[in-house]
Image (cartoon, grey):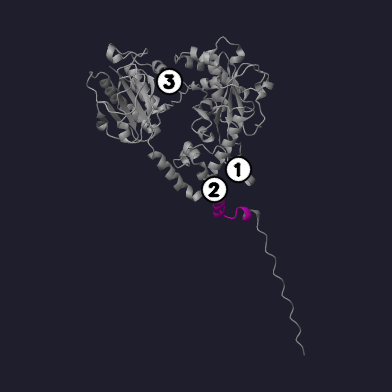
Amino acid sequence: MATPPSPSPSPPPPPSLPSLAEVIFSSEQANHNFSRILGDLKRANLSITNRLRSIRHDAAFVARVAAARRPLPLPLVANERCGSWYIDPALKAASAYFKSTDGHTGQWKFSTRRVNLHLLDLIAQHNGFWPARAGLGVATGSCIIVDSTRRGKRIPDALSKTVPIWCAVLNRALFPEAPAAWHALHVPPNVVSASEQSQIEARLPRFVADFLALEIDLAPLQQRLRNKPLRPLWVTQDDFHDDDDFEGSGSELGLYPVVCCTSSRRVAGGTEVGEGAGYIQGAGDDTENWALGLTAPLFWAHADALLTTPEHELPALIQRLVAAADAVTVTTELVQVAPCLAIGVLPPSPAARAALTVASASGATTCVVALVPAATDAASWEKSPSHLEVGLGGKSKAASRALRAALPRICDFVSRFLLRPDGDDDVGGGSSLGGAAEKRAVAIVCESGKDLSVGVALALYCWCFDSSGQNLLLVGGDREPFTKTKIRVKLGHILNRVPDANPSRATLQSVNSFLMGWRE
């Protein structure tokens, strides 16, 4: 007799669905892992490769703006530090220094140590910006100032406020009798509020007074601009088209447009996800955190190699490029900034630095003050009666602060050199200082040729010469007390001679502290 089949076992109950908390917030470890993954993705997006590709992309946009609707590209001005990354060196006409911090809300400022007057020549010389259909009967000049910004901003404060302040101050200072419209502060709409614009305008008279206190000869500046005001305009990747002719101000005849170009495309959060993943807004900013020593000139000289090298091989390639650049001998050009005083870039080797101590073409004997980055004992600084090698140590702020303690020794050394009897010279061979008016000259060199050397030149200019350039050491008499106004005036004279000089706040504070703390 057949055995009846056993009944089928009951199916297991379906698994219970997890709660929402279990799915999304299952554990602190899961949350930590999720955050780590997001962080890894963000760091991957911020790779050196993505930065360099983003810079190349933005530089192409800048070149389009320069060339749009014109037979010749407009001159491109890099607002440093990052502006040079976005301009092909073949197109770069100059550098400028408009700080975003001078445009921060509530901190608006006209900088008397970054007056950027060299741009006036560039602006006035370049003709043909405005097309015929804009209604202008005469050619006018212009330039494009290039900068970038990060984290989703549309326009950096340097371009939306600092440059407009600069334009308004110069218009008021150079053309005080001009119509009120010339003196207006122009800011980009929908970026700077009417309230903020009004607050900045209220400070313009003080900014003008600060500029006039530099006692810069205004007549040559007025002649350069030929009785036309400066007028800022703005262009970004969001609102530019290749057929743009900037007609927004075409009805304003007889002016000089100062085009403020934001090179980077606006991206929420600063980095793009999805189809355009990898693009970084403001990729050229904060190079000390990612560039490994790579500079804008090095990038442009080796762009193809850098952009085709795998990410994991880039650090080694950059290291080789930087080392090769450091090994190249740099010719030091000295720029006279005051009677008997010149500044330049520090040669890379001790031998090259020693060769700077020379007799100039005009017969002036040159003394060299070399400001080197290595920290050295002050007792070892004096290499010869005409060569002082000052080891301040460190970089930027640290060296600037160390300058305060070094200035008494520097001024004493230079004073002794300038007062040395004839025939007591210790002269080598090498570079020259043309056109020196005095029998002796002093060359001050630092790594950049724009910061520490400017500070030392300013201190020596105040210490050794009066406002007319007469050597106080030779004529004798009592030295008048130093004041901030007198120091600022002489700084203005130096900046007029070297427009791309960029002395840091710490450097100038060291100079002020030394001079104003001096007692006979």
The answer to whether residue 268 is above or below residue 144 is: below
Q: Assign a secondary structure to mark 2.
A: helix
Q: Is residue 401 above or below residue 165?
A: below
Q: Which residue is mark 2?
A: 44
Q: State yes or no: discs 3 and 2 in contact (Cβ < 8 Å).
A: no
Q: Residue at x 60, y 43 (%)?
A: 272
* Magenta stretch prevailing secondary structure: helix
Residue type highlighted by circle 3: Arg
Q: Where's residue 35, x and y in %?
A: 55, 49
Q: Are marks 1 and 2 in contact (CB under 8 Å)?
A: no
- Element assignment for label 3: helix
27 part of magenta stretch: yes
Q: Upstream in the sequence, badge 1 or badge 3?
A: 1
Quadrant assignment, res 364 = top left
Please name the amino acid that badge 1 sits on: Glu
Which one is earlier in the sequence, the residue at label 3 or at label 2? 2
Residue type of the residue flagged with mark 2: Ala
Q: In front: mark 3 or mark 2?
A: 3
Q: Out of 193 and 309, give the one closest to the viewer.
A: 309
- What span is in magenta? 22-35
Q: Position of residue 136 (x, y in %)?
A: 66, 18
- Are dots 1 and 3 in contact, CB under 8 Å? no
Residue at the top extreme, as displayed: 177
Residue for badge 1: 272
Q: Count residues near mark 1 (Cα–Cα under 10 Å), then give few for <14, some for 14-19, many for 20+.
A: some
The residue that label 3 is drawn on is: 497
Q: Nearer the viewer, mark 1 or mark 3?
A: 3
Q: Nearer the viewer, residue 114 or 309?
A: 309
Q: Residue at x 30, y 26 (%)?
A: 358
Q: Where does the image place residue 402, in percent across and percent down from the top left?
A: 34, 30
